[in-house]
Amino acid sequence: MAANYKKFFAGSRNVPKGISLGYPVPGPQEASADQIAGQAFFATPNEWSDIQASAYDFIVIGTGPTGVAFIEQTLKHNPNARILVLERGGFWLPTHYQMLPLAFQAATGSPPTTYPWTRTTRMATTESEFFQAGYIPVLGGRSTYWSAWCPAPGPDLMRDWPQELIDVTLQPGFWDRARAFLHVTSVDRIHDGVYGSLQHQLDVNLRENFKHYVPSAGSAFPAPIAVGNTPWKGVKFYKYSTVGTLLDLQQAQKALGAQGKGQPLTIVDHCVVDRLVHDGHGTVTALETSRGPLAVSSAKVVLAMGTIPPATLLMNSFKEALPNIGKRYTGHFMSHITARVKRSAFKDLSSLEIGATYLDGKAPNGLQYHVQASAFAAANPEADESTIAHEAPDAAAVASMAQLKGSEDYVVFVCATLGEVSEKNPDNWIRMNGGTSPSTNITLQLQPGVQDHHLWDVLDEATYQTLDVLSGRAGCSGPAIEYWVDNASGDGGFWQSERPGKKSIRLNIIVHEASPLWMGKDPATSVVGLDYRPHGVRNVYVTGGALFPTSGSWNPTLTMCGLAQDLADRLRG
């Protein structure tokens, strides 16, 4: 016990005794978050030379969902696997920001979000003025801020995917394993006093009516969100981030290493990989990093960097060998509709209740959309502000206090409806621009085409139809629906009975970017092979949405993690 107390108060690493205990002089009087986390989890700058001289089985670049899914699955197969993890950022949040004090909502925009590219003038200045959602360059990446919706697409939604890749997702346990990794829970199974009666009534309304009153819809169900199944007993809603999983793995491997039963998991933070150095015949021999060169030796390099960064890295490393990179650039555009109906449309609601549902469908042209609907019944919104912020299904689509105040006798619906960008638009691409920085020397262009605009009309109408179904007014007079319209000044808004105009509900952001490294058999018509390797490259493997031949409309993280786990299975030997 005394040893534990001494370790707790003096720190976990061996430091000079006098400095650590204040004799003969005072020790350092400050500590940054990077220093605190680094002491426990990350390799020190002095250890870089040892890392350069070491041999690894895998070098994983990135600490977001796909990287950690790959690492966890690999260590399940073989705890003696030698894995080096390179993260471009440092330690920022220990978990998803929704699980932190309410004040952390103020930290969700810039500077945590970065944009490592240049948009074309056409993309930035046309009427649509689209911009690409940015990246979070810290440990855990966007998993510290993501919405966490995790539907599993069926084969009918994987349009133009290679059959071999679809077959992977049909293997027994594929989706269950990915759900377990991300802690995915259907919200109708959460019974914590916030999700309950309202959720049940929404489910009944949707199940019994959507096929008749939303003619373009294919399926509908309670929202599957990465919020549960934590080791904590009694916790029913806890939004998932990869930070805890990765650091738990690091500590577990450290303990196994001390027992001679495993290899330590080495994590290097603040390490940007700029280029893959290769021999001209497809074998990467070294990495150029911000910390200096790193020999690859016999390691397999796994790019788990999101969607656009691995495309940038491969463009800078294999420009001539992989000419198709960036010729596809897809993602999701979005409409956002907020509405309300009287509480009397539902029965036996408590003071605060939240619910969430998911509906997907297709336009006549085959392009897909889905509706993410969150519902808030808050009789005392100011008193429950913190609970609402912590348990909102999607922090980016939550009823604001301006909308909830004055709606105490209502149920407020917030619908984020996503539609897929067609992969067949030649005006959408990612290209190198001659810039000097290899991590940002690309230009993006994405413009919605005719087919996309047609889908957008369909998904807007489907959202209004879904609101009718959820509120119980489909096919009958039912309760009146009111819609929120923002003031022109951007300060507050008001409710009205008329549907808001297109410009007020359609957002100019592209999310869930996908496809610049799409998979396929033929090197002439794809970038990455069915074994996750770029065509002609021997020891590099790709994870993430960059692999998707088409984006669909479904939230991609569950699929990305399932494929990353499949990659770990294939490389286990």
Image (cartoon, rainbow, N blue to C red):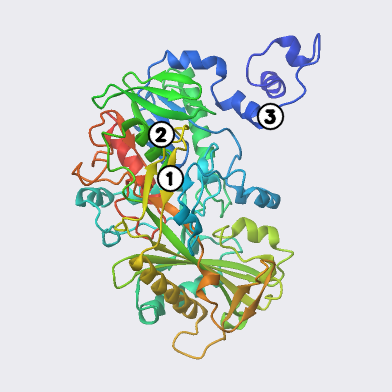
Q: Which is closer to the viewer, label 3 or label 1? A: 1
Amino acid under label 1?
Thr
Count every numbered label the image shows and give the total: 3
Q: Residue at x 29, y 67 (%)?
A: 366
Amino acid under label 2?
Ile
Say which residue label 1 marks.
443
Can residue 241 be seen?
no
Q: Position of residue 298 (x, y in %)?
A: 31, 20
Q: Secondary structure at mark 1?
A: strand
Say which quarter of the image contains residue 425.
bottom left
Calculate the distance from the C-alpha at mark 3 to the C-alpha at mark 1: 35 Å
In the foreground, 248 or 66: 66
Name, please, the residue furthest toward the bottom. 477
- Quadrant where the N terminus sits is top right
In the foreground, 167 or 146: 146
Say which residue label 2 marks.
71
Q: Position of residue 24 (x, y in %)?
A: 81, 8
Q: Secondary structure at mark 3?
A: loop
Calculate the distance from the C-alpha at mark 2 to the C-alpha at mark 1: 31 Å
Q: Residue at x 35, y 29 (%)?
A: 301
Amino acid under label 3?
Ser
Question: Which of pointers 2 and 3 lies earlier in the amino acid sequence?
Answer: 3
In the foreground, 82 or 162: 162
Q: Residue at x 46, y 73 (%)?
A: 463
Q: Position of residue 57 (x, y in %)?
A: 35, 23
Q: Residues within 10 Å of mark 2 (few under 14, many from 20)?
A: many
Question: Which of pointers 3 and 1 lies earlier in the amino acid sequence?
Answer: 3
Marks 3 and 1 close (CB-CB < 8 Å) = no
Q: Residues within 10 Å of mark 1 (few under 14, many from 20)?
A: some
Say which quarter of the image contains residue 537.
top left
Say which residue label 3 marks.
32
